[in-house]
Amino acid sequence: MSNNEIDARGPRFGAAITTLVLAAVFLSPGTSLATGLLLVQATAFGLGAIVGLQAQPYGIAFAKLVRPRLAPPSKFEPSQPPRFAQAVGFGFTLVALLGLAVGSSAVTAVAVAFALAAAFLNAGFGFCLGCEVYLLIRRL
């Protein structure tokens, strides 16, 4: 494993937490709980995208609490695609927060729904939509 590679199970764990957080946001629109959780998720995405995956809170939880209890990783992946996916998630959560700020529940709901769908695909099926977009952009 190089410094540029990560345990492939980590992003999927993070996506599972993200799915739960965004589902709670989506199911409690207009509440202070939803706003707080959306801020937490935006911060998590922002740290992962801007600082790096080593600063992403769900990744830290995986590394400290989950990974030591698992068998050694058998699959590694480059860190750039998941980091790009964090940036995409950060963009969607910023749009959702902007929707809240201007009073547009429709914008908030759509942005959260897109981020939730992508997180669910990764958590449930191991399909990282943001990672695939990153790879497609690289090929172009």
Image (spheres, rainbow, N blue to C red):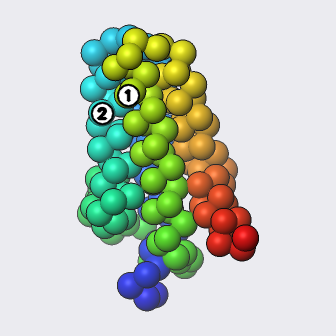
The image quarter containing residue 6 is bottom left
Res 87 seen here: yes
Which of the pair 89/14 is nearer the observer? 89
Sort mark 2 into few (<14), some (14-19) or many (20+) by Cα contacts within 10 Å: some
Left or right for 53, reference 118:
left
Q: Which residue is mark 1?
A: 97
Name which residue type carries label 2. Leu
Farthest bottom residue?
Answer: 2
Is disc 2 placed on a helix, strand or loop?
A: helix
Residue 132 spot, x, y in % from top left: 66, 60
Number of marks in picture: 2
Is disc 1 placed on a helix, strand or loop?
A: helix
The image quarter containing residue 68 is bottom left
Q: Tell me if residue 86 comes above or below residue 6 in the rendering.
A: above
The residue that appears at 54% across and 38% down in the rendered structure is: 115
Res 12 seen here: no
Q: CA distance from mark 2 to mark 1?
A: 8 Å
Quadrant for the C terminus in the image: bottom right
Sort mark 1 into few (<14), some (14-19) or many (20+) by Cα contacts within 10 Å: many
Which of the pair 9/106 is nearer the observer? 106
Residue 77 spot, x, y in % from top left: 54, 75
Q: Which residue is mark 2?
A: 39
The residue that appears at 60% across and 43% down in the rendered structure is: 118
Q: Which mark is residue 116?
A: none
Residue 127 spot, x, y in % from top left: 66, 55
Q: Are marks 2 and 1 in contact (CB under 8 Å)?
A: yes
Could you tell which of marks 2 and 1 lies nearer the N-terminus? 2
Left or right for 46, reference 89:
left
Give the mark toward the camera: 2 or 1.
1
Q: Tell me if residue 109 comes above or below residue 18 in the rendering.
A: above
Name which residue type carries label 1. Leu
